[in-house]
Every structure is written in structure tokens, then in C-alpha cells.
């Protein structure tokens, strides 16, 4: 894989590390999949090999049932965070962007039924398309940031980071109590309601805030 992190303005020299994700961090999304809301954040990891950029069309695995889009605000980590407070977490964030937590939903449902881990459904090669990152200093209020996914001209997912059950800084502090976060790691912050299947030929537009848009097609 030749993916390298990108700033919206150009190259980023941080290495590509792991992606730490959270499930069910927006109540409306937990509800749409008939899942209970967890009492502590439910974490999982996508490896560096799952990360791809939006500069190339999204490749969805074939013959594995439905592949759902989960639009999420992504956070780029710029310094080592181990057991940090929420205030310290803020200092470790260097960028914000959008990512898709691609999920093989039929595979995941079968795994859930057996009580098995989710990696096969969520951590495959290409399972984490990421937009370029906006420098953190250019994001006025990360805790009140709109995110929107438009698929073939129709708004599919729309949310605001203020609706998260565990907010971005608290979430990163909690993650850092379990996994040391390193420069180049990415945190995915959960998806709002409206997840659904992707199909070959779909055109997606991912919007961060009101003024940043990233387009990508599905092949
Ligand atoms: Zn997700």
C-alpha cells in the first residue's frame, strides 16, 4: 500500500500508524442497528494496512455481502499520548478530517451472533478511506463540527460532533489509557445515523463543516 497521510495543502510526513475506532458513539446510530448504548466506549482497531486515501476510487470487497459506509470525523495524532487527561489529549491532536469506517455488515452480523471479534468485517485492506487532514488550528470548534455524507446526490448521513456520547477529547483520553497513541495514528470518532450499503458506481461527497468537501467514487 502506498498511502501516506496528506494535509489539505500537501504532503504530511507523519508515518501511517494504527487507527483506533469507537463503536456506537452516536445514540441514533446505535438505535438504527438495534444495539444497546455501551456504558464505556467500545473500541476496536484497524491496522495501517486498512488505510487508503480518497484520491483513488473506493474498492469494496466482492462476494462478501453488503459493505456499509460509516462516515466519521477522523483525528490525526501528532505526539505520543499514554494515559493522558482530556486537556492533554487536545495538545496531541494535529489535524481533523473525515474517514469511512467501511463495514462488511452481513459478515459483522454473523460474527456478532457467534460472539466473535469484528476484524474480518472492519479491518481488511482498504477498510479505512481517509480524507486529507485540516490542521487542528484551522478548526474553530472540534466539538461542534458538522459531518455529512452525500451518496449519488442524496444526503445519507448527517451529524454533528456535539451529538457524540463520548466527546473527542474524552474519547482520546480513554483510548490512551488502553493503547498508547503515537504520531501518525488516527482516531475514528464514531458514525451518526444513516449508514447503508455502497454499490459500484456510487459517487460520494464527504463534507466537513460547511466549507470542506471531498469527492470519491466507488468501484
Ligand atoms: Zn464506525
Image (cartoon, grey):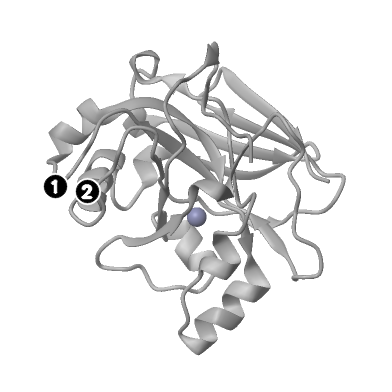
Please determine whether, in this image, residue 106 is positioned above or below residue 148.
below
Give coordinates of residue 109: x percent, y percent. Answer: 59, 77
Q: Quadrant of residue 199?
A: bottom right
> Residue 40 sits in which quadrant?
bottom left
Circle 2 — which element?
helix
Circle 1 sits on which residue? 83
Residue 108: % across, % down: 58, 73
Question: Residue 163: where, in percent of width, then height?
Answer: 38, 45
- 12 up-or-down from 193: above or below: above
Residue 2 at what x, y percent from top left?
63, 35
* Residue 61 drawn above or below residue 153: below
What separation in Å lies between label 2 and label 1 (alpha carbons)?
5 Å
Label 2 residue near ligand 1, CB within 8 Å: no
Residue drawn at x 31%, y 40% as measured from the top left: 168
Residue depicted at 53% across the width and 35% down the height: 98
Judge by depth and name the residue closer to the eye, 8 or 191.
8
Q: Earlier in the sequence, mark 2 or mark 1?
A: 1
Q: Element type at marker 1? A: loop
Amino acid at each position: 500500500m502506498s498511502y501516506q497521510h496528506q494535509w489539505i495543502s500537501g504532503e504530511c510526513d507523519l508515518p501511517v500508524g494504527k487507527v483506533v475506532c469507537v463503536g456506537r458513539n452516536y445514540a441514533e446510530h446505535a438505535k438504527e442497528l438495534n444495539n444497546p448504548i455501551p456504558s464505556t466506549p467500545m473500541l476496536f482497531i484497524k491496522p495501517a494496512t486498512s488505510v487508503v486515501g480518497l484520491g483513488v476510487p473506493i474498492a469494496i470487497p466482492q462476494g462478501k455481502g453488503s459493505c456499509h459506509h460509516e462516515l466519521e470525523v477522523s483525528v490525526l495524532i501528532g505526539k505520543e499520548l499514554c494515559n493522558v487527561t482530556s486537556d492533554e489529549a487536545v495538545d496531541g491532536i494535529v489535524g481533523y478530517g473525515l474517514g469511512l469506517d467501511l463495514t462488511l455488515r452481513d459478515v459483522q452480523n454473523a460474527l456478532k451472533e457467534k460472539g466473535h471479534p469484528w476484524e474480518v468485517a472492519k479491518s481488511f485492506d482498504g477498510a479505512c478511506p481517509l480524507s486529507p487532514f485540516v490542521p487542528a488550528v484551522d478548526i474553530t470548534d472540534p466539538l461542534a463540527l458538522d459531518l455529512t455524507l452525500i451518496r449519488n446526490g442524496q444526503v445519507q448521513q448527517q451529524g454533528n460532533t456535539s451529538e457524540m456520547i463520548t466527546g473527542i477529547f474524552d474519547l482520546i483520553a480513554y483510548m490512551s489509557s488502553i493503547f498508547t497513541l503515537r504520531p501518525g495514528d488516527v482516531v475514528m470518532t464514531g458514525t451518526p445515523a444513516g449508514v447503508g450499503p455502497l454499490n459500484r458506481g456510487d459517487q460520494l461527497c464527504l463534507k466537513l463543516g460547511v466549507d470542506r468537501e471531498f469527492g470519491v467514487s466507488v468501484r
